[in-house]
Amino acid sequence: MPEDVTLAPINGPDDYVGRHGAEKFFELIDAAIPAHAHRPVILTTHMDLAEGTAHALDALVAANDPPRLFLLGDSPVRIERHPNDGHPLTRELTESRVVYHLAESLEWRKVTKDGQTQSALPSVAVARNILASPELPFPPLERIVEVPVFARDGHLCATPGYDTAARIIYQPPDGLDVPPIPTAPTDDDLAEARALICDDLIGDFPFIGDAERAHAVALFLLPFARDLIDGPTPLHLIEKPTAGTGGSLLADMLLRPACGRALPAMTAGNDADEWRKRITATLSESPIAVLLDNVRRLDSDDLAAALTATTWKDRPLGVSRTVELPVRCVWIATANNPILNCEAVRRTVRIRLDAGIDRPWTRDGFRHPDLPSWTTAHRPQLIAAALTLIQAWVARNRPTALHARLGTYEAWSAVLGGILATAKIPGFLNNLVAFYDEVADDETQAWYALVRAWWVLYHDEPVGVQKIWMLTQGERGIDLDLGDKNEKSQRTRLGKMLGRMRDRIFDEYRVLHAKPVHGAQQWRLRKVAESQPPTGDKEEMLA
């Protein structure tokens, strides 16, 4: 029997073994196996499921070199090429896909009653048993990239294939030849890289300030530095006052060097269920970046959860189990003066464009009139520029930027802020206060108004929901959306909203629970810093 042939333990057809004996039975099997077989052979006749599964897994592992089968989070996946543009992505291993790999990795045969062997179909039961295994012997995967990137320990993943330490697959497209990156970039190296990015690539976009430009460069660098960041990354919002200002083009150009193509947009969901399904489906393909194009409103709780997660958990459509997927992508949105709720605002960094003219799409005199073609032609140089800026930061012991931090995204702030400071690109996170003040949604603004009026009338006195509800009534009442039902329904809704706002600070006032009175919940404000209270006429507000 050829050395690379494995027989799963079987007894063979009882009638044949009874008439001819087990020794003769296996002699016939041995003679029937093709001498040219280069795959392990597995016999399905009277196959023990557990041992057959073990043999099948051994064959899959042996054939998985170089690896194509991985564990993405807790989901077994395989690497595929997109049918349209050929970029690599992950697909979850379903029963039918496991059967495919079983057919590819093993020669399946069965024994007839007269002791002959013939080809058989792969066992569906074995495929199901593999998917049900509590542990699968496939290597873990966190990202697929098409360009060199930095691993979490600071080394540059520039060799095509699977990097075991980084848990990254690097699959460059044909013909991509990235210039060498200096181990210790000089100031001249930094100046050349900075000019290529800030002048040639984004120099013609109408940023409203240094912070917007710095955040654009941070977005450009993020795919190359993502694994240096031990934590989540925020949403990069490219916004502008009117269409035609170049928001979608900027998003495309900033990600084109890392992705090699225009990103498809993930449309916003109409409800929580749609948001969750779309996020899960998108993350299951291990994307480099996720783009939300031309959004009007960002108020999804599921998106907010994904933006602060390093692992996304969900139950996909038609599947009875929960999957866990790593969140290692870059998040981007483009919009014309969008509305963000308070949860989205604190998870977002702004990149605002404003051409300052009525028809911004009529502008001309650009450095590179056909910027997409220029970016594609200079992709290797742009990749090298990004890697040079990051390598300079690594080589100089990873300094952090002073006074630049975004809550929840401390690791992102430290890495990108440090890289930009090393590259002498100013403005990182300098527009947070202005952004929060300008884009807060109607509900958030209403809560600020409600808390100010509440303080003027009651200061830190405990009050019930009834008194707070009164502040929303009448022509001059605070326009808080409490529905259009009766007073009892509105007060109930307000009570639930107050529960969600517990311990929130508006201006200098914190919303707190107070001791119940006759079983009714009471609320109070507490001033958390010395400041002047809101001004207003108490009698006028009570009128």
Image (cartoon, rainbow, N blue to C red):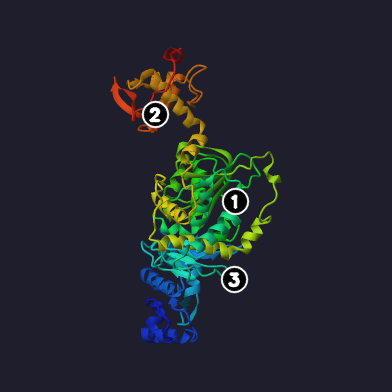
- Disc 3 designates what residue? 175
Q: Residue 262: image x %, image y %?
A: 60, 56
Disc 1 element: helix
Residue 168 visible in the shown view: yes
Q: Circle 3 sits in a helix, a strand or a loop, which is it?
A: loop
Image coords of residue 317 (percent x, y): 49, 50
Instruction: Choose between 456 and 34: the one closer to the eye.
Output: 456
Q: Which mark is residue 295?
A: none
Query: 335 and 168: which one is in front?
Result: 335
On the image, the x and y values in percent for residue 414 come to: 40, 52
Q: Earlier in the sequence, mark 3 or mark 1?
A: 3
Q: Residue at x 42, y 64 (%)?
A: 167
Q: Is residue 186 above or below residue 319?
A: below
Residue 12: quadrant of the picture:
bottom left
- 20 is higher (above) or lower (below) than 427: below
Badge nearest the viewer, 3 or 2? 3
Residue 306 to residue 389: above or below: above
Q: Say whether disc 2 or disc 1 marks the residue closer to the N-terminus.
A: 1
Which residue position holds label 2?
Answer: 498
**Marks 3 and 1, how far apart at CA:** 25 Å
Residue visible at 49% across and 58% down?
223
Circle 3 packing at 10 Å, graded few (<14), some (14-19), many (20+), is: few
Q: Nearer the viewer, mark 2 or mark 1?
A: 1
At label 3, the amino acid type is Gly
In the figure, residue 52 lies in which quadrant?
bottom left
Q: Secondary structure at mark 2?
A: helix
Q: In the rendered image, which quarter contains the N terminus?
A: bottom left
Q: Which residue is mark 1?
A: 250
**Residue name at image x 52 percent, y 53 percent:** 217
Seen from this angle, which residue lies furthest front? 188
